């Protein structure tokens, strides 16, 4: 298990049984296995590609890079996005299943970068096209910064899971209904049946 999200779980409980609900198990697996869609257009993607190698070992975080948007739940937009590529980026985002998350990586993705002043075809911020969860500035950002952004996204997802859990507990705590009792006059007179 990941010690970041479960700090109270001691490593000495290897032979123990952990009981949980199916919903908590589903949320833990959603948190621990983000599958990013690779969407790179320029030099930022070279830095992202170095994460897949053995030095940074991208897989130890449960991140399995996907090439299909229907199997991904995280899209890392890396590099300059032009007006011509904007519809395809939006289409890829719409094809991803819920819940889906976005990390905007690099100055060109966040603000248009150095190309935004001279070029009419550069999108000045990918957040004008799709909602962004984590912004990762830099030109290009280092692989350590990408790992930090993924850690921040995982913390954000765990907060969302906790908020959903608290909300569901408050809504489904108990069932109450208004009673419809009518107070009537007592029928007990104190006289027992003397016929026996």
Image (cartoon, rainbow, N blue to C red):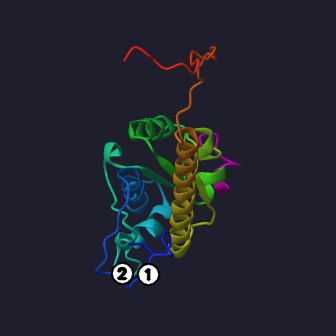
Q: Is residue 85 visible?
A: yes
Residue 171, how many percent across, how many down? 56, 38
Q: Position of residue 73 (x, y in %)?
A: 41, 49
Are discs 1 and 2 less than 8 Å apart at CB?
Answer: yes
Left or right position of 1 against 187: left
Which residue carries the number 2 mark?
A: 13
Q: Residues within 10 Å of mark 1 (few under 14, many from 20)?
A: few
Residue furthest to the bottom in view is 12
Say which of 30 and 133 sits in front.
Answer: 30
Please name the residue shown 43% across and 41% down the image: 98
Q: Which residues are magenta?
A: 112-122
| Disc 1 from disc 2: Cα separation | 6 Å
Q: Along the horizontal axis of the image, is 183 left or right of 1?
A: right
Dot 1: element: loop
Q: Quadrant of residue 24?
A: bottom left
Element under disc 2: loop
């Amino acid at each position: 298990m990941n010690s970041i999200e479960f700090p109270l779980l001691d490593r000495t409980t290897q032979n123990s049984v952990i009981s949980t609900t199916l919903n908590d198990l589903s949320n833990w697996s959603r948190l621990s296995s983000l599958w990013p869609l690779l969407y790179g257009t320029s030099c930022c993607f070279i830095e992202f590609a170095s994460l897949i190698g053995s030095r940074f070992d991208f897989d130890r975080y449960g991140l399995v890079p996907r090439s299909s948007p229907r199997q991904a739940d995280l899209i890392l937009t890396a590099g300059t996005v032009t007006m011509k590529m904007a519809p395809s980026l939006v289409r890829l985002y719409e094809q991803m299943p819920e819940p889906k998350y976005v990390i905007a990586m690099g100055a060109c993705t966040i603000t248009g970068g150095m190309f935004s002043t001279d070029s009419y075809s550069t999108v000045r911020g990918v957040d004008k096209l799709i909602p962004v969860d984590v912004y990762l500035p830099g030109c290009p950002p280092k692989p350590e910064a990408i790992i930090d952004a993924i850690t921040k996204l995982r913390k954000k997802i765990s907060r969302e899971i906790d908020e959903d859990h608290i909300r569901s507990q408050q809504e489904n705590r108990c069932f109450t209904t208004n009673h419809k009792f009518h107070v009537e006059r007592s029928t007990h007179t104190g006289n027992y049946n003397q016929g026996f």
